[in-house]
Amino acid sequence: MEELVGLREGSSGKPVTLQELWGPCPRVRGRIRCGLQWLKEKLFRVDEDWYFLAILGVLMALISYAMNFAIGRVVRAHQWLYGEIGDSHLLRYLSWTVYPVALLSFSSGFSQSITPFSAGSGLPELKTMLSGVILENYLDIKNFGAKVAGLSCTLATGSTIFLGKVGPFVHLSVMIAAYLGRVRTRTLGEPENKSKQNEMLVAAAAVGVATVFAAPFSGVLFSIEVMSSHFTVWDYWRGFFAATCGAFTFRLLAVFNSEQETITSIYKTSFPVDVPFDLPEIFFFVALGAICGVLSCVYLVCQRNFVGFIKTNRFTSKLLATSKPLYAALAALILASITYPPGVGRFMASRLSMGQHLVTLFDNNSWALMTRNSSPPWPAEPDPQNLWFEWYHPRFTIFGTLAFFLIMKFWMLILASTIPMPAGLFMPVFIMGAAIGRLLGEALSLAFPEGIVAGGVINPIMPGGYALAGAAAFSGAVTHTISTALLAFELTGQILHALPVLMAVLMANAVSQNCQPSFYNGTIMMKKLPYLPRIRGRKIGSYPVTVGHFMNCAITTLAKDAPLEQVVKVVTSTDEAQYPLVESTVSSEAREHPAPCLAHSRCPVN
Amino acid sequence: MEELVGLREGSSGKPVTLQELWGPCPRVRGRIRCGLQWLKEKLFRVDEDWYFLAILGVLMALISYAMNFAIGRVVRAHQWLYGEIGDSHLLRYLSWTVYPVALLSFSSGFSQSITPFSAGSGLPELKTMLSGVILENYLDIKNFGAKVAGLSCTLATGSTIFLGKVGPFVHLSVMIAAYLGRVRTRTLGEPENKSKQNEMLVAAAAVGVATVFAAPFSGVLFSIEVMSSHFTVWDYWRGFFAATCGAFTFRLLAVFNSEQETITSIYKTSFPVDVPFDLPEIFFFVALGAICGVLSCVYLVCQRNFVGFIKTNRFTSKLLATSKPLYAALAALILASITYPPGVGRFMASRLSMGQHLVTLFDNNSWALMTRNSSPPWPAEPDPQNLWFEWYHPRFTIFGTLAFFLIMKFWMLILASTIPMPAGLFMPVFIMGAAIGRLLGEALSLAFPEGIVAGGVINPIMPGGYALAGAAAFSGAVTHTISTALLAFELTGQILHALPVLMAVLMANAVSQNCQPSFYNGTIMMKKLPYLPRIRGRKIGSYPVTVGHFMNCAITTLAKDAPLEQVVKVVTSTDEAQYPLVESTVSSEAREHPAPCLAHSRCPVN
């Protein structure tokens, strides 16, 4: 005890103990201690939020990677089973369909039995929460297990059911952030801080996107665009930090697991650097944007109407209310039967996974030119070296397959999205956009087979660039975001098409934002959640709502000069308790034939 | 007249003239007219801001391109003169130095004679304006000519004076936006709308950055990070639209002028796609970020102190107050003499332009490895095929040249930034960062000459990747932004190094944001403009300001029990009009020796 006191006094220049004198270089040690103290203060003066954000990023990356790993195993087992089963058509059909049917009915039943909140993507609800509405228990950690298990089963069905991971993963990330926040509040005894919580939720959403695509930039921007209407630069820095931690850990795990040599983009492309596209092609890129915008509107309208139909139809609504797993199984059976490869599936590249869809669609070469003179037969097994053969069928050609893929996936995606289970729609929409772009690109490469002549060298038109632009534009139009363009670059590792892709995305957004609410806003409206109406512009005249739309026009009035019998007639003929009194019968009649006030019929029909 | 009336009536279903009946398909024509009417309404229902933004983008692109074009001609004339002048050292020296001296003294004299607002980058003042302060006449269109002429002259001096274009260009863009806004308000008779004006200014800032670098993404994000503390998604979309218009037009002009085959990135790189870097290299990237952060702090401190010294020093302050052109000429003479190629300039690649500096620094190959065994002589003329030879001197090696370049440019940039003329600091800082990165990269490639062995193939370490990361990290640390990482990718057209560069930038920002205000904030403080203090964190304890810092401690008090002579002594010894009255002499004395309240001295000195 004496010695301890002595030590403490020693450090303030008072009597020094022997022990202290014996230690080598007391001054240096003191300075080092002082330096460490300073460093500790510096590190802790930083809001401990940063540590929290790093933990969140790493945790979500681990979950994302573990989920991908498990899904990969299940998919491989399914492929093995399908390959080994022999030539019996019935057995092959069963092995192809039973898997997704079982997985989907389990996914739907399990997650719904635990909590109904786990269904769908979760992004619309998060958007509602960030605009200030409290959705009780929506971020409860209890939902976590249900959503993880359900999502894993959904994704393990691969391209058969054709659903994505982004939306639910953002929901999971936000759940974890809310949970960690509660834990911290409880352990540190801090008061609850609403604005701090919201900041964390935005950062967590960025982490969610970043750990799915390993794309920190677009993760941050996409989550901001989708979730908020305004934000602070402060949030944006936090989002970047957390998203970088997440994306880095996610890719690091892939390297550690020897899947990759080093950290690179997920769907690497190798477009030639010198002349990626010719100047006149810009026009086609913008046209592609407009096409994607129009198609996205069609998709959004169909999706909303079909969901409404499912809800109101007597048979389906009863099925959905009583036995969700059965509904999921039926839908899965339909979808799996259509994608059965020896059946119709061979015309829609159904043997490829969703990742392979993207990789093949971003291919440099023009398939139309490559198959113009030779027509390779449809391979019995997918050829790992030439995966794109899956998109080609001798009877249908490339164009037929791509168009068929688009048409079928269009309604299949809508059907799949009605199943009550955790599933995202971003990735399928992204792939459909890539297919739209590819279709246009292949057509152009066939129309201009001589390509671009630049500096004496002939550069053929690359349909892959159009696929990139189409993916960004269509997904951007459906979600009303611009950062999908950046996502396309981060996914592929090349940013050569920066301007044409950005122009396509802007064009697509201009079309779709004018005509339809975004997918997320549409879902919010369908679910009757509160939302902020869209600002169309500053001109009041641009709003199509007039007084006539929400005021009751069919009211009965009494005139001062009306004879008694008329008054009696009016009073007895209606149930109303109050009657407006007008000056004379004339003004009463004028009221009964008001000037037409419909805003929609501005253009005279002649 | 009769017929016209008939026509007009005809279109509303009333009597029809012969002419109308004769026209083919009246119904179809009517429908087309109706459709056009609808389209017109749609297009005009969109806020006309969009047209305004497009005009702004195109206009700024034209100005930027015209300026580049003119500067290019002047630089070529200078090179021609320098090359043709023969071997006389005096003449060559004169031809090398007179040009920048004349240009800079004209730039400084001309722009300062018109308006003092044209000096410097303008970004700090814009930041102040966006935080709500009104700086009278700062965005006056009269300043425009002065800034354009001054900036062109500054940039025409090339890498001799080593200054950039971004800051002044943002100022120009904002001036144009403010002018167009005033014109619109006057012609349309709209009331002034402050929030709308601010929106336009943010979008204009994005256009400014985008038309310099042809980088719409980073243009928007950089301007947001630098200029605002919070923003709406609405602004962000406008920024993207305007920036895309600007960047597209800017690159289009280059294609039309046959400078390029097609629209591509400005400083294209061709890093190999497969293994751009090995996993352990991530550590060096982060270390590079930390180095850049520390160096940026050193730079900011030196810069501030030197500017303060110039202002307080008797000789320089008098020179600056009376004859700015003379000061500019003297500074230019010093800078040009140092960069004179046959003199010291040969050790700092002074024959390259700033663009060539960047292109060479981003080179794939390792110069250290290439010059390890052979030592090519210093070429008499820059070799267009191997521009990087300029960075090599047989006596100094690559490392000596790079280090010398950095050390010299460090203080030369500080000196150049004190000249009162329109000039930006972003580009020079970006190049210095690239040199720092290159230095580390070359050292690493020499330390690990065997490179990365991946899949049996040896991939040498690429110093170009480090140059990219260094440029982004150093410029990000000086300006306190993260979007410089994105800028680096947009400039080079490859986004392979996304994660390591982002991590370097985050590290550099973590260091510099903790230690120093950003360059822009520092300038705001030096110019004594109002600014919002930085939010360090939520903990009150993290703020080092205490009451003792801003309250007057040296006050004289009167005690109730003080004798008369003491009161007289106190009252006559000071000039104050009021004296606080304290209970007794004891409490008065206690006040005179207050407890130490310095927050900085937390660590006891032992």
Image: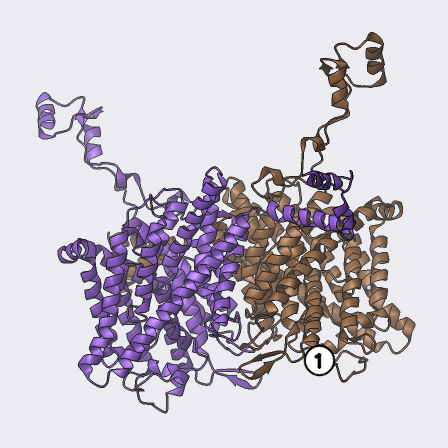
Chain colours: A purple, B brown
Q: Position of residue A553 (x, y in %)?
A: 22, 36
Q: Position of residue A76 (x, y in %)?
A: 34, 75
Left or right for B581, reference A108 = right
**Considering only vertical position in the picture, is A444 above or below A283?**
below
Report if residue B471 is visible in the image.
no
**Considering only vertical position in the picture, is A68 above or below A88?**
above
Q: Secondary structure at mark 1?
A: helix
Q: Which residue type does callout 1 highlight?
A: Leu
Q: Position of residue B518 (x, y in %)?
A: 67, 50
- Judge by depth and name the residue closer to the eye, B192 or B340: B340
Residue assigned mark 1: B369
Left or right for B498, reference A194 = right
Quadrant that contains the C terminus of chain B: top right
Mark 1 belongs to which subunit?
Answer: B
Label 1 neighbour load within 10 Å: few <14, some 14-19, many 20+? some
Left or right for A587, reference B357 = left
- Judge by depth and name the residue closer to the eye, B194 or B222: B222
Q: Position of residue B101 (x, y in %)?
A: 83, 61
Left or right for B72, reference A110 = right
Report if residue B542 is visible in the image.
yes
Residue in view at x 71 percent, y 63 percent: B432
- Judge by depth and name the residue closer to the eye, A302 or B347: B347
